[in-house]
């Protein structure tokens, strides 16, 4: 695939995903009654955390979040908007959940494609796609003092890995970039939304834990 086309597509998808995730980070801060600074920090961590970890692991340094001012401006703007307009945003709970699912789908695809572009094999690239999608949320929850959502039976990481895997396989097959991105995005988003609608969860331990 042409390098220019790939780079442009990754930046656009990255920024959209960052904004969407940053809104969810800002909402967590507001719902825990944290201040404006905390809202912008959690928004930034949620939006940039997964991509930051990915870039460090694949050797894409300095990370895009530090090399391009747009990557810093977008989550700060999302955090400020969420903090000041949270009553309106909070009433759109289902829409926010949909945005979060879309952000997950966007990030798993961009993360996988960027990893491939930096020479990783199919399996590591798919894992990097998953890390890109779930990393920011894990950091957000840890900083907010709660158990990360993905560890509570929520089907979140698995759809991200599946979407990243589809994108990797199609890219290796020489499929046009637009088809690769659309297929990976649809796979992850479809699985995540079905899990939400049908109440699907990952297996949890049954019975009392042995201490």
Image (spheres, rainbow, N blue to C red):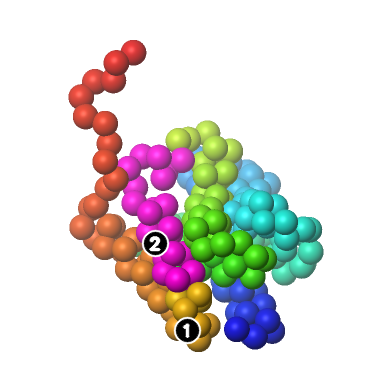
Q: Disc 2 marks which residue?
A: 162
Residue at point 41% right, 45% down?
A: 150
Indicate the secondary structure of the residue bearing disc 2.
Answer: helix
Mark 2 → mark 1, Cα distance in angstroms: 17 Å
Check residue 158 for magenta coloring: yes
Would residue 174 be found to the left or right of residue 63 on screen? left
Residue at point 52% right, 34% down?
A: 145
Q: Are marks 2 and 1 in contact (CB under 8 Å)?
A: no
Picture quadrant where residue 151 is located: top left
Whether residue 142 appears in this view of the structure is yes
Check residue 190 for magenta coloring: no
Q: Main secondary structure of the magenta part?
A: helix
Q: Disc 1 marks which residue?
A: 175
Q: Nearer the viewer, mark 2 or mark 1?
A: 1
> Vertical placement of 59 versus 184: above or below?
above
Residue at point 23% right, 53% down?
A: 199
* Mark 2 closeness class: few <14, some 14–19, many ≥20 residues within 10 Å: many
Whether residue 81 appears in this view of the structure is no
Residue at point 24% right, 20% down?
A: 208
Would residue 71 be found to the left or right of residue 143 on screen? right
- Viewer-proximal residue, 64 or 83? 64
> Vertical placement of 127 versus 8: above or below?
above
Percent position of residue 172, x then y: 50, 75
> Vertical placement of 77 versus 41: above or below?
below
Picture quadrant where residue 112 is located: bottom right
Q: In this picture, which residue range is highlighted in magenta? A: 148-169
- Viewer-proximal residue, 61 or 64? 61
């Amino acid at each position: 695939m042409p390098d220019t086309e790939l780079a442009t597509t990754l930046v656009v998808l990255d920024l959209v995903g960052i904004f969407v995730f940053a809104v969810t980070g800002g909402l967590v801060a507001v719902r825990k009654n944290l201040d404006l600074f905390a809202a912008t920090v959690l928004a930034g961590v949620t939006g940039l955390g997964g991509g930051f970890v990915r870039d460090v692991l694949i050797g894409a340094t300095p990370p895009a979040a530090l090399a391009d001012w747009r990557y810093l401006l977008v989550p700060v703007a999302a955090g400020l908007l969420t903090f000041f307009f949270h009553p309106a945003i909070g009433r759109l709970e289902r829409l926010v959940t949909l945005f979060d699912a879309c952000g997950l789908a966007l990030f798993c695809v961009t993360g996988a494609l960027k990893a491939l572009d930096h020479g990783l094999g199919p399996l590591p690239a798919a894992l990097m796609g998953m890390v890109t999608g779930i990393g920011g949320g894990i950091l957000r929850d840890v900083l907010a003092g709660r158990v990360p959502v993905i560890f509570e039976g929520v089907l979140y990481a698995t759809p991200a890995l599946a979407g990243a895997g589809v994108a990797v396989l199609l890219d290796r097959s020489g499929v046009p970039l637009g088809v690769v991105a659309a297929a990976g995005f649809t796979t992850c988003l479809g699985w995540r939304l079905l899990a939400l609608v049908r109440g699907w969860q990952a297996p949890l331990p049954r019975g009392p834990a042995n201490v």
